[in-house]
Image: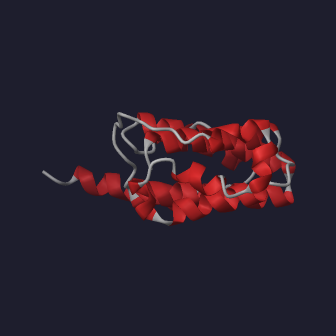
Amino acid sequence: MTEYDLYDLAAIYLIIREKPNEQEYSEVLSSVCRVLSDIENYRYVNALRIELAKIQTLKNKELFRFVFTENVYTHFHGVLKDERVFLTLLEATKQLSEAIRTSPEKAVALADALHNLPVNIADNNFQIPDDFWNREVSYYRDQWDKNFLLDQEKLFLRKKSSRKFHW
């Protein structure tokens, strides 16, 4: 995934935050999960758009018109390859999908916590910034789910603590 795919993911989270009750969102998030589940997708540009364009009902949705524009880019800052980041985005998206099915209020809160994450990853050398855990995740945990992304956060903390001792 490139930074542009991450920007598309941020747009998807924002759309869901604004209108969490739309019928297509379950299918949209399933498509996002398919892309995130295949770590080899880091090799492809527009991976999310290509997958989402298969959902015919999105063609009539103004908010999703960006999906049907295949961009050609001449410059990339890099690509997302870190499996921990993929796994975190995948788990967050799965939980958002579940929230849409069970509680629109929870879905709004979760999409609100997540919508900046893809942009922050793109802007932070394809890593999750530390303040994401302390700000967005902490707030969401306080309100809805004290274990939200806890296992994923531990993956990042473990990696940092092991780095401290390398000379």
In the image, residue 43 above or below residue 11: below
Count of numbered circles in the view: 0
Residue lying at the far left of the rendered structure = 167
Residue at coordinates 36% horizontally, 39% vertically from top-left? Answer: 125
Residue 5 location, x and y as percent? 51, 44
Residue 47 location, x and y as percent? 52, 53
In the image, residue 120 above or below residue 146: above
Residue 70 location, x and y as percent? 55, 42
Q: Is residue 146 left or right of residue 61?
A: left
Is residue 46 in sight in this rendering? Answer: yes
In the image, residue 110 above or below residue 83: above
Q: Is residue 118 left or right of residue 141?
A: left
Residue at coordinates 40% horizontally, 44% vertically from top-left? Answer: 126
Residue 130 location, x and y as percent? 45, 41
Is residue 139 in sight in this rendering? Answer: no
Q: Is residue 97 left or right of residue 31?
A: right
Choose between 70 and 15: the one closer to the eye. 70
Residue at coordinates 52% horizontally, 43% vertically from top-left? Answer: 6
Choose between 119 and 41: the one closer to the eye. 41
Choose between 70 and 63: the one closer to the eye. 70
Residue at coordinates 80% horizontally, 49% vertically from top-left? Answer: 106
The colour scheme of the drawn protein is secondary structure
